[in-house]
Image (cartoon, rainbow, N blue to C red):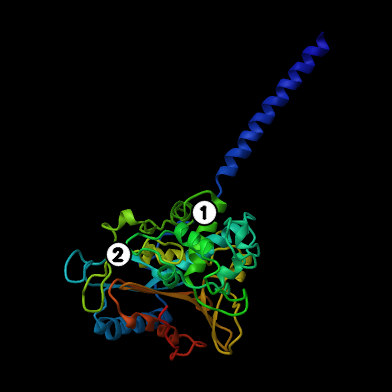
Amino acid sequence: MQKLKVFAFLFLLFLALFYFADSGLRKSASVTHPTFKRNIAENSVLTPKDLELRSLSERFFQQTLLHSRFNGGILVARNGKIIFEAYNGLTEVLKGDKINSSTSFHLASVSKTFTAMATLMLFDSKSLSIDQPVSAFLPGFPYPNITVRNLLNHRSGLPNYIYFTEDLGWDTKNTLTNADMLQLMISNSALLKVGRPNAYFDYCNTNYALLALVIEKVSSLSFSAYLGETIFKVLGMDNSFVFSMDKSEKVLPSFKFNNQKEPFMFLDAIYGDKNIYSTPRDMMKWDMALYDTAFISEKIRTEAFNGYSYERKGIKNYGLGWRLYEMPSGKKIIYHNGWWHGNNTVFSRLPQDSTAIIVLGNKFNRSIYQAKRIAGIFEGYGINIEEDDE
């Protein structure tokens, strides 16, 4: 009888220990993303090189942006310090509040940098493999040889939904969603002209609209919720969010060069390739986080920031979600530009010189794309770098 009591006591003790250990494991497992919020150093001491960079940035702002009737914000940062920051214009160009550091701009294709890194974070956590076929995540996707990596580096051979949706008879009076776009591709696969996967680079918004669906499938969260929880909230990007049509009356509108407002249209609900809003200061936090191996592993940075398309000689290339200038000196400009409606954006990173160049505008302005010329202040880049529109 005594032995039974001892056995029962030990058994209950074992159950208790197992319960508390399991509870602790489950509790720790729920905290999947530590906080990487950073305070932006505004009053730091500037080095002579910083001051030179500030002078050049201010000259670009005064002589190029303002002369082209710039409506937006610019921020140049180095080593975690704001070197130059300026805002110009009104939220509705001819009226409204003054644009300031809290004004959120449509990033256009700069949004792809978030979609790509979110995908790669899922890859890093072994939630997916980027060499798996897209059809493994999106049932019915009719092209079994196209992989997630092919979407990331624009080597899928897929056509651009911006053009094929109307060709396939979509009623432009109805708003198109990512799911609608996918279903059009499934239902009309025989009508779509699709190239051989990994044969060539062809920049295509369809790739990133599909990646957003992959992220949702793997994470069991909406694209907005996933980015909000794993990136924006974690980094303290408090003025960054994914657009949805129910926010159309609240977000910053965009304008043509002649000050006419750009209306919303049937393609405006598609996300992943575009539709993230942010500020220059939040984008500085994004830049800083990309140096932090506790946030983005070295493995992921290597995958993202290496070129994948060498069919043509030259310095231009594309990584996984990032455009590249691969200079003969060994230096890189890792960047993305954007253009959607009247929104023009530049997000350029010079990792060897710990510098970021950020320009966001909501009134059509090609001069914004000249911002990478600021990189010419450092050796190894040159100052006559060709500009891109996208």
**Which of the 4 image quadrants contains residue 43?**
bottom left
Q: Secondary structure at mark 1?
A: helix
The C terminus lies in which quarter of the figure?
A: bottom left
Considering only order in the chain, which callout, 2 or 1, is on the residue closer to the N terminus? 1
Q: Nearer the viewer, residue 336 or 259?
A: 259
Q: Which residue is mark 2?
A: 264
User: Is residue 288 in sight in this rendering?
Assistant: no
Task: Say which residue appears at 54% left-offset and 66% top-offset.
Answer: 189
Q: Is residue 15 left or right of residue 40?
A: right
Task: Say which residue appears at 40% left-offset and 83% top-offset.
Answer: 374
- Can you tell which mark lies on residue 298? none
The amino acid sitting under disc 1 is Glu
Task: Say which residue appears at 47% left-offset and 67% top-offset.
Answer: 112
Q: Which residue is mark 1?
A: 216
Task: Say which residue appears at 62% left-offset and 54% top-offset.
Answer: 127
Mark nearer the viewer, 1 or 2:
2
In the depicted structure, whether residue 220 falls above or below residue 76: above
Residue 58: percent from the left, percent from the top?
A: 31, 81
Residue 296: percent from the left, percent from the top?
A: 56, 62
Q: Is residue 90 left or right of residue 358?
A: left
Q: Residue furthest top?
A: 1
Q: Secondary structure at mark 2?
A: loop
Q: Nearer the viewer, residue 369 or 1?
A: 369
- Badge 2, how many Cα within 10 Å: few under 14, some, many 20+? some
Residue 249: percent from the left, percent from the top?
A: 26, 57
The N terminus lies in which quarter of the figure?
A: top right
- Badge 1, how many Cα within 10 Å: few under 14, some, many 20+? some
Q: Is residue 198 left or right of residue 180?
A: right
Q: Residue furthest left?
A: 95
Residue 103: percent from the left, percent from the top?
A: 29, 63
Dot 1 and dot 2 residues touching (CB under 8 Å): no
Q: Nearer the viewer, residue 225 or 302?
A: 225
